[in-house]
Structures are given as structure tokens and as C-alpha cells.
Image: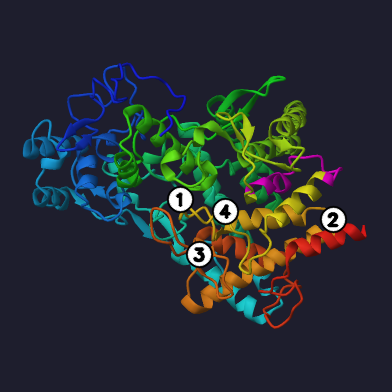
């Protein structure tokens, strides 16, 4: 495996490439152990960067330490996340002391008796889901106005069913637990919230944007406001919004959608007082990304600053400890390679695309992941959008100096964005790899995110038209169930072919719909129709909504691949479907018996239509 550019550790590598002073991965019966009670993981130079902030007293149970490692090594749980979501039945210090007493002060993980370990877990841990109450949202009503306005009878009935699912996904922290925070990995929030569903039993950052899309269709402004307040509280506590509502997510975030979420809430409600109250917090989150995820790159002609998913951790993710460790062990990684891989995995999780060939050096194999070396076009388009929105929000909050400041930043951002990401030869925006100092010319739906966020000159549609043709040439428009996440079918990863995801389909739809070009607007409707019909067919068959879908078959099915089984619920899938039905409430219908490309479930080769249209004009 290629040794990449990362911080060099304070020890000397032997001729084999493995550390001579192997404190980090001390071998025991062939197993390379991570955690000890009286030895630092990466030596006394303090290079260990755990997944929890140091302020948590329970981090040595949930984020690092021999208990976490032993539970995962001995497979006490089928899913690593189930352990780190469990509830402690004693104080963290007491549990660690008891573990040392039973298994020794420096237990060798492979030699721990599994039965004794299992009994220890039963004695000191309660299963997940014992800390949250199911709640009925205060503003839920049986027949919301926007849903009743959907003209197709079958779609309206389905929308009402999805509206009902909000009640099954609503959670609130049990009030009696606020005095026992150290016994939980949960990040305590004051308001009820909507969870994605399945193993995702807490709030998640970028999911919230699309969940709120659906809540606003359901007329649930108050629930939307509650969820925004929870995220804003996270910014005030940590300086940013964590990936999700657990302490093991407090070193990483997710795509920055809080500012757009507040913007869509304001657009729907006109609640300018809410905007004024929280503008400083929104700016604080924006500054976090500028201070912690921005790096300089050399374009040859000039040096510029741009944003990366670059999580400052170098240990296995607690919620996926087994999966991360298995990759490092399988490929016999050195300490340096392991640390690079663990950071790449955490950074990919921060991107939301965990995992995808988009981040792989060779485009195929998971262990070649190099996320932190890649400047992503979509992350930078999101932050470009954030800059634009902040300018607008400061304007409506009667702060003209701040409004002018962010408008100027937006104009400068857009120019820099073009310099870094636009490839004139290919006619699209692409990720920039700092290792190769080139664009990654593999096509992903993420290249369309600048259309969604408006991070281009909207008075000049030539670039959006070229990008539209590029997506057609790459055959992203040719599948009956919607837009796949890539055309790469070699990885088996969940953010690759043949899976389609709600947020990506929604951003492509919205990016094309916002165009002034009629054929792009028509394509937006066609994709929306296909995505809707695919979700509908799966729902009619299973009575469930899923986090991802296989888009290639005439009879759609749930998606697959990745580190865990496909999950049901599902927050953002419900939100996107409700938003599409509301957007096209008087136009979209259930039908599959026509060759008309604008009717649900039917495919006409996209490139044929695109080329014909642009030949005519």
C-alpha cells in the first residue's frame, strides 16, 4: 500500500516498514493491540487523537480503552454501534476499575475469556434504546393542507401514510436521565427530534435538512424549529454540529446544512425573530469550517484556500470499530498507514458518503481511501451556499455591514471555486486531489451540487448546460429508479452503483429545476417522477421506507452494500418524497403504461433527448 503524506510519528521505522517501538500496535498472538490502561496508544508524544472530546468522563468506555477493544475483538455485539449506544449501570470509573480487577491491569485482549467478558457486559450495561422516549409531535395534525392538496389520489394516500411515520420517528430524551449524563453516550438535547430510523436512533446532522423539508410539507413548523434549536445548541456547546447525537461523533461533523436549514425554515414561516436570535450562532458554525477544515492548495499559478473533510482523529471509529480494525489487520498496515486509514474513514463519514469509490486511490479498494487529500466539490459548494445565505440573513436582520461583508465573500468564494474545481476541457466541476494535483474525472452526482447551491454565474447557463450533458453522457439519467450514486459497480460500497440516495436525487432535481433551461427543468421532473415511483413501488411491497434504493431494476428494491444492513424509517427518504409530491402537487401522477418520458417509471435514453434538444436550439 502506498505510504501517503501524513504526520510522521515520533519513532523510527525498521527495514520492514513496521515500527521498532510498537507501543501503538503491540502484537499478542498475532493480534495488534490498540489500548492499554497504563500506556499511551501512540507513545508519550501525545499523537493519539480519539473520537471523543476530552471533556467526557465516559470517553474511556465509549471512545477508547480496553473495554471498547475487547468487546469488538470478541464480537460481543453483531454491530459495534450497539455497544457504544448501551447505557452504563454504574459510573465510568467504577466500571473501568471492575474491568481491571477481573481481567488484570493490562489485559491482553485475545486472552480475555469471552464468557467472562459477556457476563461483565450484562452486569454493567443496558441495551440501546432505553434512554429515549417515543413522542408524538405537538404540531402533528391528521390532514395537513399541503398534503391534502396533492391531486393524485394514490400519491395523496401515500403522503398521508408517510406523514403518519413522523410519530414513529419522534424521540425525546427521558427527563430523569439529565442528572446521569456520564452513563450515556447520548448528547442530551432539550427538544424532541426526528430520527432517521433503524440503527440510527439519535439525531443526525445533514439528515435534518431533508427531514425538515418533509416536516414543512406536513405543516410541522414547531417540530422543525425544535430540531433547529437542538443543532444550534450543539454549535453553542461544541463550536460546530457533530455528525450525530453521540459523544463518539464530537470530533467530526457532516455536510454543513444548518444555515440552509434555517433559511428554508424562514422561507416557510417568515420567522425573522428566530433568524435574528440565532444569527451569531450560525456565523459561529461557519467560522468553525473556515478555521478547522480549510487548507491551502497550490494550483501552480497561485495558492488558494479551500475546504476538506479532514477529521482530526487517527483511531478506529467507535461505532464501526470492528470494521475499521479488520481493514487495518487484513492489509497488515503499519502504524502510519493505519492512522492514515482511520482518519480517511472518519473523514469519509464526515462527508456523509461512507463509503464510496470517490474517496479511493484506486477507485476500487476500501483500504486505499484518502478522503483527507481530496477537496470535494460538493462541500465547497455547500459552504459557498452558506456564505450567500448568511449575507441574505444579515440583510433581513437589518445588519447591512455584515450583509455586505458576506456578499463580498460569496462573490470571492465563487471565483475561487471556479479556479479550483471547474475543468474547462470536461465542462464540469470535479473534486481536486492534492496527491495527484489533478481533478478526479470520474463522474458523480456531486458535480451537480453547484447547480443546487447556486455557486456559479446564473446569468450564464452555458456551464450548467455542459454539466447537464456530462451527466447524460455518463448515463446517470438512464435508470428507472432515479440517479445512482456512481457508475462504479466494482466496490460493493453503499455510496456506489447501483444505490440511489434521497439527498443526491433531491439536489440533482432541485439543481435542474432551478435552471432557466426548459429541457433541464423537464429532466428535473422526469427524475423526480422516477425517484418517486421507485420509492412508491418498494413501499407498496414492503410497507416501509428505506435509507437507500437500488435504482437499476424495473421492479425497484432497497439498496445494499457497506458496513451494515439497509435501514428502514426513514427520515430523509420521507422528507424528499413529501417535498417532491408537494412541489409537483398538481402535475405528478401514478402511471407506468406510457412511453412518455414525463410519466412515472419510464426511461427514454437521456443523451438522445439532450443532444436532440441542443441541436434544435
- Colour theme: rainbow
Instruction: Label 1, secondary structure: give it.
Output: loop
State whether residue 185 appears in this view.
no
Residue 535, placed above or below residue 282: below
**Alpha carbon separation for disc pair 1 and 2:** 38 Å
Instruction: Label 3, secondary structure: give it.
Output: helix
Q: Nearer the viewer, residue 273 or 73?
A: 73
Residue 16, placed above or below residue 72: above
Q: Nearer the viewer, residue 215 or 372?
A: 372
Image spot of residue 165 (x, y percent): 49, 68
Mark in front: 1 vs 2? 2
Name the residue beneath numbered marker 4: 224
**Alpha carbon separation for disc pair 3 and 1:** 14 Å
**Label 3 or label 1, whichever comes before in sequence order:** 3
Tell me the tag on residue 166.
3
**Alpha carbon separation for disc pair 2 and 3:** 36 Å
Name the residue beneath numbered marker 2: 517
Q: Is residue 127 magenta?
A: no
**Alpha carbon separation for disc pair 1 and 4:** 13 Å
Q: Are marks 1 and 2 in contact (CB under 8 Å)?
A: no
Name the residue beneath numbered marker 1: 203
Say left or right for 108 vs 607: left
Q: Is residue 451 magenta?
A: yes
Using a 10 Å C-alpha cutoff, classify the residue at mark 1 as few (fewer than 14 neighbours), some (14 to 19) or many (20 or more): many
**Label 2 or label 3, whichever comes before in sequence order:** 3
Magenta residues span 446-462
Q: Assign the N terminus to one quadrant of the image.
A: top left
Amino acid at each position: 500500500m502506498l505510504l501517503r503524506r501524513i504526520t510522521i510519528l515520533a519513532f523510527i521505522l525498521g527495514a520492514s516498514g513496521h515500527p521498532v517501538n510498537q507501543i501503538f500496535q503491540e502484537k499478542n498472538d498475532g493480534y495488534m493491540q490498540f489500548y492499554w490502561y497504563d500506556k499511551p496508544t501512540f507513545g508519550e508524544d501525545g499523537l493519539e487523537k480519539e473520537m471523543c472530546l476530552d471533556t467526557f468522563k465516559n470517553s474511556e468506555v465509549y471512545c477508547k480503552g480496553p473495554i471498547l477493544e475487547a468487546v469488538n475483538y470478541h464480537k460481543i455485539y453483531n454491530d459495534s454501534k450497539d455497544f457504544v449506544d448501551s447505557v452504563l449501570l454504574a459510573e465510568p470509573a467504577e466500571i473501568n476499575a471492575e474491568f481491571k480487577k477481573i481481567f488484570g491491569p493490562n489485559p491482553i485482549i485475545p486472552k480475555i475469556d469471552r464468557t467472562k467478558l459477556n457476563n461483565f457486559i450484562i452486569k454493567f450495561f443496558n441495551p440501546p434504546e432505553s434512554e429515549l422516549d417515543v413522542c408524538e409531535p405537538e404540531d402533528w395534525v391528521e390532514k395537513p393542507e399541503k398534503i391534502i392538496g396533492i391531486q393524485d389520489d394514490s400519491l395523496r394516500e401515500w403522503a398521508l401514510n408517510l406523514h403518519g411515520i413522523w410519530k414513529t420517528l419522534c424521540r425525546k430524551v427521558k427527563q430523569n436521565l439529565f442528572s446521569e449524563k456520564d452513563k450515556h453516550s447520548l448528547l442530551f438535547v432539550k427538544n424532541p427530534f426526528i430520527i432517521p430510523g433503524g440503527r440510527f436512533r439519535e439525531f443526525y446532522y445533514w439528515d435534518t435538512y431533508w427531514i425538515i423539508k418533509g416536516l414543512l410539507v406536513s405543516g410541522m413548523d414547531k417540530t422543525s424549529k425544535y430540531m433547529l434549536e437542538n443543532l444550534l445548541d450543539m454549535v453553542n456547546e461544541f463550536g460546530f454540529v457533530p455528525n450525530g447525537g453521540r459523544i463518539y461523533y464530537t470530533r467530526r461533523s457532516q455536510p454543513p446544512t444548518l444555515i440552509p436549514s434555517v433559511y428554508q425554515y424562514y422561507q416557510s414561516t417568515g420567522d425573522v425573530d428566530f433568524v435574528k436570535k440565532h444569527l451569531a450562532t450560525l456565523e459561529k458554525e461557519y467560522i468553525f469550517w473556515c478555521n478547522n477544515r480549510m487548507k491551502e492548495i497550490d494550483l501552480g499559478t497561485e495558492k488558494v484556500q479551500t475546504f476538506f473533510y479532514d477529521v482530526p482523529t487517527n483511531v478506529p471509529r467507535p461505532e464501526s470499530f470492528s470494521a475499521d480494525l479488520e481493514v487495518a489487520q487484513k492489509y497488515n498496515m503499519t502504524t502510519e498507514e493505519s492512522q492514515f486509514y482511520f482518519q480517511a474513514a472518519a473523514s469519509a463519514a464526515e462527508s456523509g458518503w461512507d463509503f464510496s469509490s470517490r474517496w479511493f486511490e484506486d477507485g476500487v479498494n476500501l483500504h486505499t481511501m484518502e478522503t483527507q487529500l481530496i477537496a470535494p466539490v460538493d462541500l465547497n459548494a455547500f459552504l459557498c451556499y452558506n456564505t450567500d445565505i448568511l449575507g441574505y440573513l444579515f440583510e433581513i436582520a437589518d445588519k447591512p455591514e455584515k450583509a455586505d461583508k458576506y456578499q463580498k465573500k460569496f462573490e470571492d468564494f465563487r471565483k475561487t471555486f471556479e479556479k479550483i474545481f471547474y475543468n474547462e476541457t470536461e465542462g464540469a466541476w470535479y473534486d481536486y486531489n492534492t496527491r495527484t494535483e489533478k481533478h478526479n474525472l470520474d463522474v458523480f452526482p456531486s458535480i451537480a451540487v453547484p447547480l443546487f447551491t447556486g455557486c456559479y454565474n446564473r446569468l450564464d447557463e452555458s456551464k450548467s448546460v455542459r454539466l447537464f450533458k456530462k451527466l447524460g453522457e455518463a448515463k446517470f439519467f438512464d435508470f428507472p429508479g432515479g440517479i445512482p450514486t456512481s457508475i462504479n459497480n466494482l466496490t460493493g460500497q453503499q455510496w456506489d452503483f447501483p444505490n440511489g440516495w434521497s439527498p443526491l436525487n433531491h439536489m440533482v432535481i432541485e439543481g435542474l429545476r432551478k435552471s432557466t433551461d426548459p429541457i433541464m427543468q423537464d429532466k428535473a421532473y422526469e427524475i423526480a417522477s422516477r425517484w418517486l415511483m421507485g420509492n412508491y413501488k418498494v413501499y407498496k411491497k414492503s410497507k416501509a421506507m428505506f435509507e437507500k434504493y437500488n435504482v437499476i431494476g424495473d421492479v425497484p428494491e432497497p439498496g445494499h452494500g457497506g458496513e451494515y444492513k439497509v435501514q428502514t424509517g426513514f427520515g430523509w427518504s420521507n422528507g424528499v418524497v413529501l417535498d417532491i409530491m408537494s412541489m409537483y402537487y398538481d402535475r405528478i401522477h401514478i402511471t407506468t403504461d406510457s412511453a412518455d418520458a414525463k410519466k412515472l417509471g419510464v426511461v427514454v435514453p437521456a443523451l438522445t433527448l439532450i443532444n436532440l434538444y441542443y441541436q434544435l436550439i
